Amino acid sequence: MDDTLRSELLGTAVPTAVALAAVLLTIFRRPVATRYSERRRATTIFAILVALQAVHFLEEYGTGFHEQFPQVLRLVPWPSDFFVVFNVTWLALGTAAVIGLAAGYRLAFVPAWFFALAGIANGIGHPLLAVLSGGYFPGLVTSPLVGIAGVLAWRSLSAITEAEETWPRLRGILLFFETIVFTVLVPGTVTVLIPRNVLGIWGDTFPDPWTLWHVAALVPLTAGLAVYVRCVWEFAVRGRGIPAPLDHPKQLVVTGLYRYVRNPMYFGVMFVMFGQALFFRSLVFLEFTIAWFAFVHLNILVYEEPNLRRKFGDSYRRYTASVGRWIPGRPYQSG
């Protein structure tokens, strides 16, 4: 295994474990009917936590956390682009989750629990790293504030959720891991591996100074991530499967964003790619995005739609007659 990849995987083991814990908490603790003021309080605390985590990331980046922390673990330093993309991705999910938490969407609790746990871990971990290093360690100054906000977010989230009466079956846990693997192997390959490691069309991921182009790029990046996460959630919860031949959904997914357009997941990935092209101001990345979309469209015509017609029959035909392939329209009424 490449030393850099090994460092990235092992060095982010704690955030990965925290993400798993956040998903399990979302599965095992369901939102309860509470007063609007309680949900608003939880949302406000979470929004403050996300903002503090953004400031904390800037301190870490500016003082070289991505170089010093791997060395503590006797690993090679992380590339700056990896560190930036990793953090910006979670911050984008956290920002989208603020809206979802206010509306009471259960899916929004995944990043909410993640930020609460990660905040507590930061509040404890950075002072310990400072003690071990015998002085200042990158991220130390802002870590106490993040830690306090993490504790408050944990308490507020616990107040508006309660434990499920029954544990989910093994199938639910398996679906979670299948979704993670699918995301890494398919969208991850298209949006990261190919442009970064094969085509070499990534630019600087932390430009100095930031311009209006870079700020504007965060809009499609955030929207694309939100759309993609919502779609895979629908596949797992409603369809009981993943969008891959190994474990196709057992039921036709016509809920959520699929009520308005037949291929919203591809839209989500495309928004992310357009955001990357805008962020890097790269015509080549835009051309790559257009070529990818052409391939996706051909694959839908030749493989996906014929396969879905064979599998779901009349129900899929009724669905395609009412919902456009690429152009959103009026919500589909099933039944």
Image (cartoon, rainbow, N blue to C red):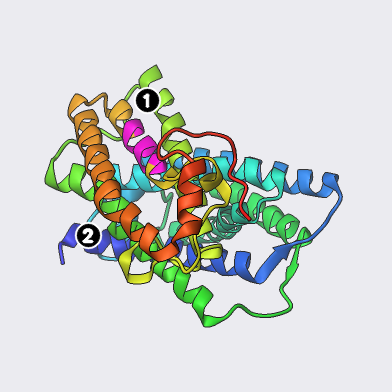
What is the quadrant of the N terminus in the image? bottom left
Q: Nearer the viewer, residue 325 or 97?
A: 325
At label 1, counting other C-alpha atoms closer than 10 Å, the crowd grade (few under 14, some 14-19, many 20 or more) is some
Residue at the spot 35% in from the left edge and 65% down from the top edge? 181
Image coordinates for residue 123, horizontal then vertical, percent: 56, 56
Magenta segment, which residues? Answer: 267-275
Q: Is residue 24 magenta?
A: no
Query: What is the three-letter code of the residue carrying label 1?
Result: His
From the top left corner, tell me how far across and down residue 294 is, in percent. Answer: 23, 38
**First in sequence: mark 2 vs mark 1:** 2
Judge left or right: residue 299 versus residue 131: left
Q: Position of residue 9 (x, y in %)?
A: 30, 63
Q: Which residue is mark 2?
A: 5
Mark 2 Cα within 10 Å, few/some/many (few <14, many 20+)?
Answer: few
Judge whether 291 appears above or below 314 on screen.
Answer: above
The answer to whether marks 2 and 1 mark residues whose Cβ atoms lie closer than 8 Å is no
SS majority, magenta: helix
Q: Is residue 53 at least partly visible in the picture?
A: yes
Name the residue beneath numbered marker 1: 214
Answer whether residue 203 is visible to the viewer in this image.
Answer: no
Residue at image position (24%, 50%) is: 302
Q: Quadrant of the C terminus?
A: bottom right
Query: Which residue does the image show at 41% across and 42% down from the upper left?
Result: 268
